Each structure stands twice: as structure tokens, then as C-alpha cells.
Amino acid sequence: MKATQFEFRFRMAIIVVIVWLGFFTPWIEPLNLGNRISTLEYLALQLSRTGLVSFTLATPLVIAVGALFAAIAAVLRVWGTAWLGPATVMSSQMKAGAVLADGPYRYVRNPLYLGIWFMIAALALTMPPTGAVFVVIAETVFYFRLILAEESFLLAKLGQPYADYLHAAPRLIPRLRSTLQPTGRKPDWRRGFLAETNPIGVFLILAILSWRYDNTLLIRAILVNFGLSLVFRAFLPAAKAL
């Protein structure tokens, strides 16, 4: 069930391919973005059909939920990366240092995977409904496989301290309070923000451009944002020596 070393090493590429399939859904029709209803429109339409709200009100509600998901994603990704460090987050190999029980890791073991799941769920609103369902399911399964692989690796490397951490911090549903004592490690917020420009950009795009009701514009902005985030990561300043 856990991911292989190959999957972990190329996890970003695999995630991008899954998202690409969700956007372009080659199983339903050729690349014809302009004539396909988005999940945002579909959900708003289904919500209005319940009779609880009109379509004009249902659409802003769906947009607000999508922007909220994107905001949660940005917070978790920046928070988690600031504490863990971009070098570890972007590494192609699993790393095992001391058990990290600071920042978001005091409340949940996998804030970064949780954050990216929220981002993908927000992005799914711009995909066709069948693509959105495919992406959310495929990404959920893939992230869970990655989590199992990392937990197995860290348990083998760190032993009892990590086993204790497994019992103290939940895997994906954060606790509001934590019994874990912080180690005194300090976050690097500047590098955290620079490394996570993609989820920050996704939040801004959904929060601002969704009100234009132009799904093609959203998709283009998301693609440009992703490209810029790769540039930011490529020129990310090195961490200061401890």
C-alpha cells in the first residue's frame, strides 16, 4: 500500500500529471476548455436545484468555499515548510533527522500533505466534474501512499522517539491542543513563503479572479502561477548555516 522510492522521488511529477488529467479529461472529449462546464458551475447549479438558494447566490457560496480551501492550503504549506525547511520539503529522498514536534507538527503529523490536498480540492473547482472527481480520489490515494512510506521510513530510522510521536500527533486530522513539548527550533518564514508561492497564488487567483466568472481565465492564471512558483523555487536562497 505504501509508495515506492520511485514514486517518492518523482512525486511532484506524478502530482502534476494527475492534475493535468483532471483539467483536460481526455476520456470525455478533445481539448475544448471553452465549452465544458466547470465543477464550480456544476456545484452551484446542483445547489440551486435543491431550492435552498438561487443560482446567483449558490455561485458565490461555492467560490467562497473554494477560496477558503485555498487559504487553508496556503497557511498549512507555508507554516509547515517554514518549520521543516524547503530543502527537506523538496528533497527527492526521504530524510530522517530529529523528531520535529514544533509549529504545525505539534498538532498533526502531515500538515504539508493536508495542505496540498486542500489546494487540489480548490483547484478541482476549475476542472470538469469528472476530472475533479478523478483528481481528488487519485491524489488522496497517492498522498496516503506517500504518508505510509514516510512513516515506515522514519520509524525504522528514528525508532522509539518517532513511535511516541506517532501516538501523540494524529496523522491528518489536527488536534486543537497538543501535549508535545516544543524543541525550541525556529521557523524560517521568509524561505517558507518563497517556497510556497504556488498555494499562495492559487488562493489569490480563486479569491480575486473567480468573480470574473471566466473559467478559461482561471486556468490560464493557475498555469502561469505554477510556472512562476517553479522559478521562485529554483532561485530560493540557501538556508543559513546553523
Image (spheres, rainbow, N blue to C red):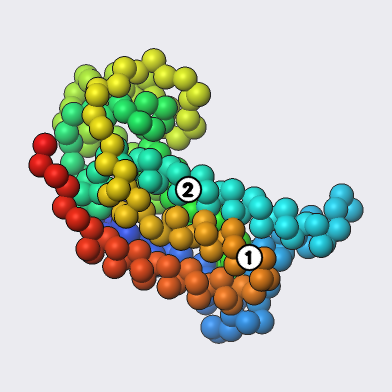
Q: Given the image, on which type of amino acid does mark 2 rest?
A: Ala
Point 42% across, 19% down: residue: 178
For the N terminus, give its image quadrant. Answer: top left
Q: Nearer the viewer, residue 234 or 171?
A: 234
- The residue to which callout 2 is attached is 73
Q: Given the image, on which type of amino acid does mark 1 rest?
A: Ser
For the C terminus, give its image quadrant. Answer: top left
Helix, strand or loop under label 2: helix
Indicate the position of residue 152 as horizontal and vertical percent values. 26, 35
- Residue count near mark 1 (Cα–Cα under 10 Å), binned few <14, some 14–19, many ≥20: many
Q: Quadrant of residue 11?
A: bottom left
Point 35% across, 64% down: residue: 229
Indicate the position of residue 77 as horizontal and vertical percent values. 39, 46
Indicate the position of residue 237 as horizontal and vertical percent values. 19, 55
Point 42% across, 27% down: residue: 107
In this picture, residue 1 sits left or right of residue 27: left
Indicate the position of residue 124 as horizontal and vertical percent values. 56, 60
- The residue to which callout 1 is attached is 210
- Tag shown at residue 123: none
Q: Quadrant of residue 47?
A: bottom right
Q: Residue furthest left?
A: 241
Foreground mark, 2 or 1, reads: 1
Residue 144 appears in view = no
**Mark before the other along the chain sequence, 2 or 1:** 2
In this picture, residue 129 sits left or right of residue 157: right
